[in-house]
């Protein structure tokens, strides 16, 4: 792999205590091109603007998918990834649905580890600090014919981050706008899924909600996911979450939460979640907690739900499942606890 180091690092200009999520990027990026039916020229180069034709297919038809993962540094300076093979498998699942060629696992893992090696000083130790890693692939054939591109670029960039949400998270149940329909691309991390969510999210913001909670597109009777998160509901002592279907993202944090909760003896039901059931549980007080899960947020409590003009508040509970599950996951991610699942993967740092 070709490695080109930056001649001047930006790291000393960064205020690591005041980071807005995903706005500052490290010194390097990993790039690989798909040309003539093959992935070629994998390289780590200084972070830089891309050169693209105005006719590049992604700009017209949105043929692009991405992943979100995080690297963590423990107190001994070791760097860790959380279930990276799952991110690799998922970007290929997303890619296939968008007619994008799959990216080889070895290149993905090697590219990632070369990049993290060069930029390891950007990963700060300490709970709450991490490096958000964004692999993505997009169509860059210079052609506006509406067919799958024959050229692509796979890139990984990295952003030092702290928490995703800075305050309360209130969500608005959407019965008008849909995120995904059966047979569509809802299960993929397709760029367009996120683009399509921004307008309904803006409308929700105007009503004082940070995010939308989506219902299924055909009946609007079932709750699916919220913003960039899968969603969990605690009714009395039971945890309920929707199954992953072709409209719901197969969240890596989601499945980790389910596993950890079950192993902690929590009763977890993975089944369709009716809006009516949650509203009833809000009214009769049996809804104890709602929280989202995702790479960026890890586990994020939801404090209020808006439904048909009414706002329901979810009062904080003592010994919340959300906090307990979050602690268990971050203890694994930051190498502060045993990892009985083999989820944590060390990035072996090679000093130059
Ligand atoms: C994630 O949490 O999985 C994400 O990819 C978040 C991102 C859309 C900001």
Image (spheres, helix red, strand yellow):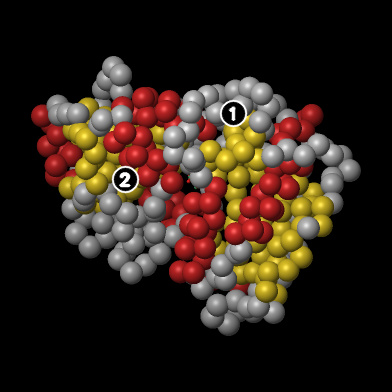
Q: Nearer the viewer, residue 46 or 306?
A: 46
**Residue sitting at x 79%, y 29%:** 12
Q: Residues within 10 Å of mark 1 (few under 14, many from 20)?
A: many
| Residue 22 in the figure: left or right of residue 175 | right
Secondary-structure class at tag 1: loop
Circles 1 and 2, Cβ within 8 Å, touching? The answer is no
Question: Residue 315 location in percent, x, y?
Answer: 26, 22
Observer able to see residue 58: no
**Residue sitting at x 21%, y 51%:** 272
Question: Residue 275 location in percent, x, y?
Answer: 19, 46
Q: Residues within 10 Å of mark 2 (few under 14, many from 20)?
A: many
Query: Given the current orientation, which residue lies at the most extreme top position?
Result: 318
In this rendering, the answer to whether 338 lies above or below 62 is above
Q: Nearer the viewer, residue 332 or 273?
A: 332
Question: Residue 132 location in percent, x, y?
Answer: 59, 41
Q: Which residue is mark 1?
A: 129
Q: Which residue is mark 2?
A: 213
In this rendering, the answer to whether 283 lies above or below 95 is above
Q: Quadrant of the N terminus?
A: bottom right
Counting residues from the N terminus, which is met first, the one under dot 1 or under dot 2? Answer: 1
């Amino acid at each position: 792999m070709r490695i080109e180091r930056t001649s001047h690092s930006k790291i000393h200009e960064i205020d690591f205590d005041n980071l807005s999520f995903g706005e500052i990027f490290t010194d390097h990026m990993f790039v690989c091109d798909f040309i003539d039916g093959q992935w070629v020229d994998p390289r780590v180069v200084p972070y830089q603007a891309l050169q693209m034709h105005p006719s590049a297919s992604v700009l017209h038809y949105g043929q692009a998918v991405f992943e979100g993962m995080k690297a963590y540094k423990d107190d001994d300076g070791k760097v860790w990834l959380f279930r990276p093979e799952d991110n690799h498998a998922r970007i290929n699942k997303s890619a296939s649905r968008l007619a994008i060629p799959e990216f080889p696992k070895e290149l993905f893992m090697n590219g990632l580890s070369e990049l993290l090696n060069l930029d390891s000083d950007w990963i700060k130790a300490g709970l709450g600090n991490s490096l958000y890693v964004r692999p993505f692939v997009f169509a860059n054939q210079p052609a506006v014919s509406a067919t799958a591109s024959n050229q692509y670029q796979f890139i990984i960039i990295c952003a030092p981050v702290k928490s995703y949400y800075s305050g309360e998270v209130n969500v608005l149940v959407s019965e008008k706008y849909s995120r995904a329909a059966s047979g569509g691309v809802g299960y993929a991390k397709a760029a367009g899924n996120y683009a399509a969510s921004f307008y309904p999210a803006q409308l929700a913001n105007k009503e004082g909600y940070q995010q939308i909670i989506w219902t299924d597109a055909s009946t609007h009777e079932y709750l699916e996911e919220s913003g960039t998160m899968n969603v969990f509901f605690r009714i009395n002592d039971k945890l309920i979450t929707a199954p992953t279907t072709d409209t719901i993202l197969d969240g890596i944090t989601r499945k980790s939460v389910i596993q950890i909760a079950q192993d902690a003896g929590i009763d977890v039901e993975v089944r369709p979640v009716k809006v009516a059931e949650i509203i009833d549980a809000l009214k009769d007080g049996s809804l104890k907690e709602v929280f989202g899960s995702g790479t960026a947020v890890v586990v994020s409590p939801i404090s209020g739900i808006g439904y048909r003009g009414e706002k329901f508040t979810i009062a904080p509970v003592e010994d919340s499942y959300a906090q307990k599950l979050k602690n268990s996951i971050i203890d694994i991610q930051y190498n502060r606890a045993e990892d009985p699942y083999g989820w944590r993967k060390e990035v072996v740092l090679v000093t130059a």
